[in-house]
Image (cartoon, rainbow, N blue to C red):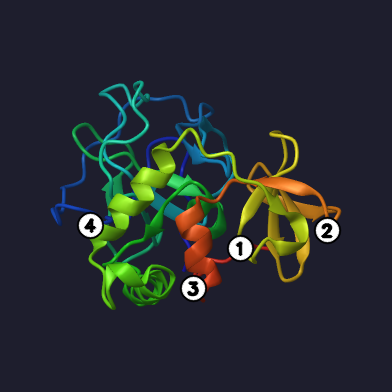
Amino acid sequence: MSLTPPSGPAKLPQAVPQTGRSLAPIPPLNRTLSMPLQNRVTPFGEIVAAAWRGGAMGNRGRLHGKDRTLGRARWAGKAWITCLLDFKGRQRTVMAPGSYTELFFSDEAVALAAGHRPCAECRRSDYTAFRAAFARAFPEAGPTPRAREMDERLHAARRDTTADRRLRAGAVPAGVFATPDERRALLRWHGAWWEWSDGTYRPAECDPDALLRPLTPAPLIAVLEAGYLIGIQPEI
């Protein structure tokens, strides 16, 4: 069952990223329900305040303060993970004081574009498949690369502001986001192009010879090319 992430105080399942600690539920803070929290992530990697529903939850550390607003930081660790919305009935309060910041993606293709990998606990089978594809894409990492090793490579790619890669539209692998104009986020999926907007998709046209800037980081494109199949799929 997929749980809808709230825009105000609500309960969500506990995801265990780096520490494995389970935090007790914290009483909801006062907040107007009409004001969405800044915890939705776009294919461009931006964290925005929006009301669209998410299909996956993410974690990259604690980014918010006691007032449940984000500070300047957009990450607080190298392990950026994508979790299920519902796992073993765990409950947690969104953006609780002292806890990590729950981020939400419409699906895993968006999460990959933002630089996240599958969680090793709540998405164990997807994590195992991801690790195997990572090993095929990067043989130097060995047959069973550790999460820390994968996170180091992914983090280096996320922080590389000098990369100016372009891909021919006809060669973009399935599951990859790319942009033709720095405004539109286009997903290649089942042999067609789909434009993402506010958590939903609509059909898009793209010249096969057009040069696009990939939004999905290069190591994650390599993992997709090596056979990783997106687990939390776009609703198209």
Q: Position of residue 212 (x, y in %)?
A: 71, 46
Label 2 to label 1: alpha-carbon separation: 16 Å
Please state which amino acid type lies under the numbered disc 3. Tyr
Residue 18 visible (yes or no)? yes
Q: Position of residue 14 (x, y in %)?
A: 27, 55
Which residue is rendered at x = 46% and y = 47% of the image? 104
Task: Report which residue position mark 3 lands on.
Answer: 228
Task: Report which residue position mark 2 lands on.
Answer: 208
Q: Position of residue 221 (x, y in %)?
A: 53, 60
Please state which amino acid type lies under the numbered disc 4. Arg
Q: Which mark is residue 175?
A: 1
2 or 4: mark nearer the eye: 2
Which residue is rendered at x = 49% and y = 70% of the image? 231
Task: Determine whether the residue tagged by mark 4 lies in a helix, strand or loop.
Answer: helix
Q: Which mark is residue 235?
A: none
Q: Residues within 10 Å of mark 2 (few under 14, many from 20)?
A: few
Which of the two labelled residues, at mark 4 and mark 1, occupies the earlier sequence position? 4
Label 3 to label 4: alpha-carbon separation: 19 Å
Please state which amino acid type lies under the numbered disc 2. Pro
Which of the two labelled residues, at mark 2 and mark 4, occupies the earlier sequence position? 4
Task: Determine whether the residue tagged by mark 1 lies in a helix, strand or loop.
Answer: loop
Q: Position of residue 98 (x, y in %)?
A: 18, 33
Task: Determine whether the residue tagged by mark 2 lies in a helix, strand or loop.
Answer: loop
Task: Report which residue position mark 4 lands on.
Answer: 148
2 or 3: mark nearer the eye: 2
Label 2 to label 4: alpha-carbon separation: 37 Å
Which of the two labelled residues, at mark 2 and mark 3, occupies the earlier sequence position? 2
